[in-house]
Image (cartoon, grey):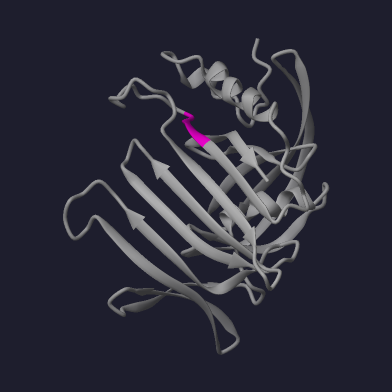
Amino acid sequence: MTQLHWTINNTASHQKWDYEKELTTPLARALSSKPVSSSADHKFHRYLMLPNYWADWYPRNAFPMGSVTANRTRRDDGEWSYKVMHSNDQSGEHLNLNFACKDEPLRPLISPWNIRTSNSADSSYSGIDWTAQCQNAEGKLNVQLTTANGMSFVSGVCNPQNPTGFWALLDILPALAGDTVDDLCVLEDLQIPKLNCRIRPLEKWTFELQGGHHQLFGYSLQGEGLPPTYWWVTETGDVALIAMTFSTYVLVERDG
């Protein structure tokens, strides 16, 4: 019988792979490493991306479908610089995000920020670079994207307060200590604003890994046009698991 929480239990969707083993083995190694200090000026986390459903079409004899790394460094002015690299090996898509956030609990984005997307194509469509920023216009906060050749357009309108990025939740959630958040604006891939997002605490989840007991604290994130995601945070403040609709991210490395 599986000990996985229902938010990350995708064992029934896999016949070829032992999903629970593929998830818990790297997680056990990561949780045996030194936790990231909450006061560290540099924080690093790396996650494997596991498919929630398996269609047997992926040619490689490997289960993880990609990875994401998140580097955060405190700047001289006290704000935080983020460098996130997301790779989907199945689709050949890669996303690099370079942005900064204020040193506040909800990590408001600081304009401008940069987005680099690429894929396995070998043509002019193989990648694109964006510079993005928030602009106040008639009482609204527009998210404006600009390409390298100067073409600009508005990708959406945010709540009056500054939006935050999806991967900034790596630092937002550990600081909540079980509190709730309402009316958050989360930028999907730092491009598309998702309005009226809510963070709600879930129950605590205690499980055993390689003879040791671990307790994780759960949170859900959902909003307009944003399918629910579930986040599990360790007692020391590291996000260990992120469950999305089609994939689950598993912590494999941490430093800071």
Horizontal side of residue 166 vs 201, given as left or right: left
Horizontal side of residue 166 vs 120, given as left or right: right
User: Depth check: 246 or 108 in front?
Assistant: 108
What residue lies at 65% left-to-right and 77% top-to-bottom? 160
Q: Position of residue 187 (x, y in %)?
A: 54, 62
What residue lies at 75% left-to-right and 43% top-to-bottom? 237
Q: Position of residue 109 (x, y in %)?
A: 60, 69
* Quadrant location of the N terminus in the rendered image: top right
User: Residue 210: which quarter of the image?
Assistant: top right
Measured along the vertical axis of the image, is residue 246 above or below residue 59? below
What residue lies at 72% left-to-right and 66% top-to-bottom? 103
Q: Residue furthest toward the bottom?
A: 138
Horizontal side of residue 212 vs 23, given as left or right: right
The prevailing secondary structure element of the residues shown in magenta is strand
User: Depth check: 182 or 23 in front?
Assistant: 23
What residue lies at 17% left-to-right and 51% top-to-bottom? 122
Q: Is residue 51 magenta?
A: yes
User: Depth check: 140 or 168 in front?
Assistant: 168
Count of labels shown? Answer: 0
Measured along the vertical axis of the image, is residue 206 above or below residue 203? above
Horizontal side of residue 226 vs 177, given as left or right: left
User: Residue 59: which quarter of the image?
Assistant: top left
User: Depth check: 218 or 72 in front?
Assistant: 72
Q: Residue furthest toward the front?
A: 76
Q: Position of residue 45 (x, y in %)?
A: 60, 43
Q: Residue furthest toward the left?
A: 123
Q: Position of residue 191 (x, y in %)?
A: 46, 64
Q: Is residue 54 magenta?
A: no
The magenta segment is 48-52
